[in-house]
Structure formats: C-alpha cells, structure tokens
C-alpha cells in the first residue's frame, strides 16, 4: 500500500475508533463481516453496537447500489466481537480498485483476524437452485484487475494463493449440519459487471469449473489474504445465471430472493460466529 493510502487508512481508523470508544466500546473487533443485501437483521442483534454511516467516515467509499445500506456496525454477535459492513462498494460502480478494497484495509488496521464475506451470486452449477447457500472453496478472478497491483510485494510474497480458509469452511459445514441447513460448496467466478453475463459467457464459466458468478468478493478476499487475514466466503444463490433458465435476469429478483434467504443466512452466520476463535 502506498504512503498516501496508508495515511487515508490511518485517518479512517483513528476516526472510527474514537467514535467507537466515545460510545463506550472497549473491545477491538476480531471478526470482519461484509454483508450483502438483506442481511441487516443479523447485525440488528449486535450488542452493544455502534452504527456509523459510511458517509461520516473520512475517505470511506459510499455504496450507490439499491439494497446496499452503507453502514459500519461495531459490536458483538454470538459472543464474538465484530465489525460489519452493511453494504459494500463494487468495482462496477466506477470506483478505483483501491477504493473498493479500502474498507478491508481499514478492518485489518482495526485488528480483525478473520473475515467473512457474503455476496449474491448467479448459479452456474445446474444442480443449484435460487435460495441455496454456497461456501466458496476458491475463486476465478475475471475482473481484469488485481487489487495488489502496485503494492510493494514481490509476486507470491506475503500472498496466499487461495484466500478461503479450510478451517473456516470446516466450522461452517459443522454449523450448517448443527442447524439442519443445507450448504453447497463451490467455485465463485468474479465478473466486473455491471452487465450480467451472456449465456455464452456462462457456458464458458461452467467449462472453466465455476459454480457461481457475481461481481464482488475476489478483490476483498485477495487483500485480506495479503494482510494475513483468513477468509470465509458465502454466496447466496439468488438466481440461476443467464441462459440456465428461459428467464430474464433482474436486480429486483436478486434482492427479493436475498430477502427470502436472509433469516436462514443470518442463522448460519450466527452459528459460525459462535464457533469462531474468541
Ligand atoms: N451474475 C452476476 N452477478 C450476480 C448474479 C448473476 O447472475 N446474481 C447476483 N449477482
């Protein structure tokens, strides 16, 4: 990270921390969460919570997408101290990649030691159905951008080639079994967006070994990995990808299904948080 970015990050972290301590919070967050649309209910139960709109945080990017609220929440869920992003920014919104991953650098500087990334995704694997949850085992980054470009590390140095942590995957599977919820596993392909993929691109992605496709997560996971933060990624399959069904894709369907799944998704995340290292 360049000196300029480092300075912005320190500015944001100092501001957030003074707001949190001013509100009586003493504990540094251990787990970072990026919550996609519909998952606000999970953090509604956080205690004690400090809620900060992104617009108030110096240098923090603002989400422009419907369904992405744009608030940072610091508190405790299921006995684990967390900092949660309710809503994220995407590369397709026109931000520089440094801005897209800025919140991850901030979470890292706040002291998080594990990161949970959630997203909405289109199902490429034809055995999936809308409403399924998929734990990410690996990603294929097709966003034509690497957020680590220009950072002062040699290729491979301080860099984990697969950010998705097997141990976090294991506790997530255990949590899903404990709750009697079904959980898929698979590979997430990251597309730049904002256009949805064409049916031809989806056939190409399936042949490459992708199970789901979305427009986020890979940059955030790569930066977390470079910071030494293990990642758990969970996709909510909100629709079947283009061409799988004879149906047009639309963002309102994505949000509708995300809302329907939210309760089940929140339960799973709560059970995962309860099992994480305290
Ligand atoms: N494609 C890309 N991103 C998505 C999709 C999709 O089908 N559904 C939700 N996010």
Image (tube, rainbow, N blue to C red):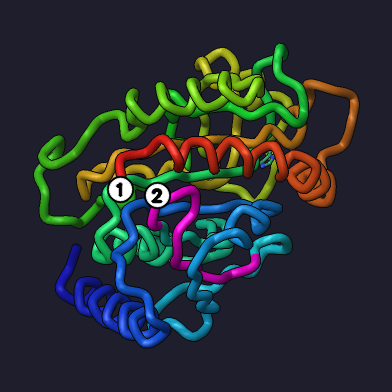
Q: Which residues are magenta?
A: 69-81
Say if 73 sits above or below 175 in the image: below
Q: Name the residue located 42 percent from the left edge and 84 percent from the top edge.
A: 23
Q: Quadrant of ligand 1?
A: top right
Residue 235 picture location, percent across and down = 58, 35
Instruction: Say left or right for 141 vs 2.
Output: right
Q: Callout 2: 10 Å neighbours few (<14), some, many (20+)? A: many
Against 111, residue 15 (above or below) is below
Tell me the residue that label 2 is attached to.
220
Whether residue 76 appears in magenta in the rendering, the answer is yes
| Label 2: which secondary element | helix
- For marks 1 and 2, give the CA distance: 6 Å
Position of 263 relative to 187 (above/below): below
For the stretch drawn in magenta, what is the main secondary structure? strand
- Relative placement, left or right, of 117 versus 107 is right
- Residue 172 locus on image (x, y percent): 48, 28
Q: Which residue is located at x 57 percent, y 57 percent?
A: 92
């Amino acid at each position: 990270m360049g000196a300029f970015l480092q300075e912005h990050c320190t500015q944001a972290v100092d501001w957030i921390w003074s707001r949190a301590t001013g509100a009586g919070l003493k504990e540094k967050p251990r787990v970072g969460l990026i919550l996609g649309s519909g998952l606000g209910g999970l953090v509604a139960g956080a205690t004690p919570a400090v809620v900060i709109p992104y617009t108030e945080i110096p240098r923090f990017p603002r989400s422009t997408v419907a369904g992405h609220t744009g608030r940072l929440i610091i508190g405790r869920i299921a006995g684990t101290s967390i900092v949660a992003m309710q809503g994220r920014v995407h590369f397709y919104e026109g931000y520089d990649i440094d801005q897209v991953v800025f919140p991850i650098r901030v979470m890292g500087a706040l002291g998080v030691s594990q990161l949970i990334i959630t997203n909405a995704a289109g199902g490429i694997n034809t055995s999936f159905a809308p409403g399924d949850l998929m734990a990410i085992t690996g990603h294929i980054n097709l966003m034509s951008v690497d957020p680590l470009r220009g950072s002062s590390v040699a290729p491979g140095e301080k860099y984990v080639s697969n950010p998705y942590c097997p141990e976090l995957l294991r506790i997530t599977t255990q949590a899903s079994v404990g709750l009697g919820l079904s959980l898929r596993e698979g590979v997430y392909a990251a597309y730049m967006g904002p256009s949805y993929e064409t049916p031809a691109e989806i056939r190409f992605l399936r042949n490459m070994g992708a199970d789901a496709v979305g427009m986020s997560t890979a940059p955030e996971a790569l930066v977390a990995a470079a910071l030494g933060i293990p990642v758990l990624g969970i996709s909510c399959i909100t629709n079947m990808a283009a061409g799988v069904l004879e149906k047009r894709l639309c963002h309102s369907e994505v949000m509708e299904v995300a809302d329907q799944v939210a309760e089940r998704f929140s339960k799973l995340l709560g059970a995962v948080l309860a099992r994480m290292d305290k």
